[in-house]
Amino acid sequence: MKAARGLATLAAGMLFGFGLSVSTMIRPEVVLSFLRFQDFGLMLVMGGAVIVVLLAYKLAPRLMMRPLLDDHFHEHPSVWNRNTAVGAALFGVGWGLCGVCPGPAIAGLGAGNWSLLWALAGIALGALVQGLRAK
């Protein structure tokens, strides 16, 4: 069962990276043109992703007795507080300044866009600072 979960995770990650690559979300200039309201192609990508996730989270528990690789469906409670709002704002500012999100940056490395290493270093540094601050 553990091997099946690992393979499913690998397949999902590969599918996700492929989708980011095909949608051109791995190119910061495309993301920045979307954020400047010059190119709305990524709106379709994000809208499609929201619909797929919404359907999966709402319909899968109703149509299946249990998930394929677990014994029950899990709830994912979220808590909104000051730290969440500040983190979301910082993430949004960083995304808006450089046009890079962590998932597409990693997928972009797979496509040979090595300049994304700078953005990933900044993301890692921000995560480290937040982790140290949260202690």
Image (cartoon, grey):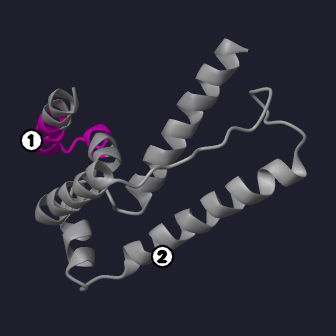
92 or 78, nearer to the observer: 78
The residue positioned 22% from the left and 55% from the top of the image is: 86
Label 2 element class = helix
Which image quarter holds the N terminus?
Answer: top right
Q: Position of residue 31 (x, y in %)?
A: 25, 67
The outermost residue toward the bottom is 38
98 or 83, nearer to the observer: 83
Instruction: Estimate how packed mark 2 is, as few (under 14), some (14 to 19) or many (20 or more) residues with alpha carbons within 10 Å.
Output: few
Q: Position of residue 56 (x, y in %)?
A: 70, 55
Mark sitting on residue 118:
1
Which image quarter holds the C terminus?
Answer: top left
The outermost residue toward the top is 2
Instruction: Estimate how packed mark 1 is, as few (under 14), some (14 to 19) or many (20 or more) residues with alpha carbons within 10 Å.
Output: few
Identify whether 71 is placed above or below 64: above
Question: The magenta stretch spans which residues?
Answer: 108-126
Mark sitting on residue 44:
2
Dividing the picture into quarters, in which one does residue 109 lie? top left
Q: Main secondary structure of the magenta part?
A: helix
- Image-based side of 50 in relation to 70, left or right: left
In the image, what residue type sits under mark 2?
Answer: Leu
Dividing the picture into quarters, in which one does residue 90 lie? bottom left
The outermost residue toward the front is 81
Q: Position of residue 42 (x, y in %)?
A: 39, 72
Along the polypeptide, which appears first: circle 1 or circle 2?
2
The residue positioned 69% from the left and 54% from the top of the image is: 57
Kindly check if marks 1 and 2 are in contact, taking CB atoms under 8 A apart as contact: no
Q: Is residue 134 magenta?
A: no
Q: Position of residue 116 (x, y in %)?
A: 16, 45
